[in-house]
Amino acid sequence: MIRDSLRGHFLLATKNLHDSNFFRTAVLMLEHNEEGAMGVIVNRPSSVNLAHALVGHFNVPPSENVIYVGGPVEPQALSMLHDNPDLGKSDITVLPNVFVGSSAEAFEEIIMGESPGCTSSFRVYSGYAGWGSGQLEGELDRGDWFTLKANTELVFSNRPYQLWDELLQEYYRQHRILPIPAEKAEWN
């Protein structure tokens, strides 16, 4: 039996988690129910340029956008998060103003910037993180993950390499035992 759904939360890898796929990662949970859970790692940009990766599928204008490593499951599969509520009426809402792009049309409109009022806040991920029924709950019970409510700004952070540290500091701030911050969070 699952606890409350963690959709719209970050999982923060702890020192207890010994899977190198998740070292110092922040995973945005896209789904969590009786059947299992899935999310994408939001702080692991790859070196693959988005325009280069989509050659042959879309004529994407050159940009600094890269594909993010979403997780070890199905690494060839691409998915997208975006913040445009006018696209993809059937897109899954993960949290306010964060949607999972579920149609090829929405994907193309956002990537190509063709939609009126189209936003530049999007990320494309290769692969995802997935857990079978009860698997994530076991990892949580072992202390492999901390959980923290997500927000749109952090999902699309332009500082992905610092994101895990920032989220961990926020987790410790919210779970502080002493009323004053310590120089080292683990002293708290």
Image (cartoon, helix red, strand yellow):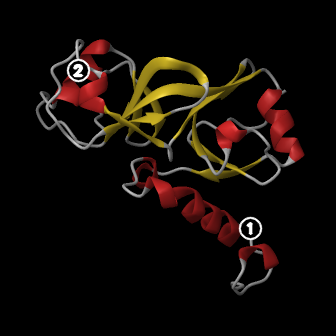
Who's the residue at 18% across and 36% down the image? 118
Position of the N terminus, as image quadrant, is top right
> Which quarter of the rendering shows the C terminus?
bottom right
Above/below status of 52 relative to 3: above
Whole-angstrom CA distance, mark 1 to mark 2, is 41 Å
In the image, residue 132 lies at what x, y percent? 75, 20
Query: Nearer the viewer's eye, disc 1 or disc 2?
Result: 2
Q: Secondary structure at mark 2?
A: helix
Q: Which kind of residue does numbered mark 2 sit on? A: Glu
Against 34, residue 29 (above or below) is below
Left or right of 93? Residue 10 is right
Q: Nearer the viewer, residue 147 or 42?
A: 42
Q: Determine the residue positioned at 31% across, 24% down.
A: 53
Quadrant hosting residue 38? top right
Kindly identify which residue carries mark 2: 108
Instruction: Answer few, some or many: residues within 10 Å of disc 1's Cα (few below 14, many 20 plus, some between 14 and 19).
Output: few
Residue shown at 55% from the left, 64% from the top: 166
Residue 20 drawn above or below residue 154: above
What amino acid type should be assigned to the residue bearing mark 1? Answer: His
Percent position (x, y) of residue 124? 38, 31
Q: State the mark number for residue 175.
A: 1
Q: Quadrant of residue 51?
A: top left
Local secondary structure at mark 1:
loop
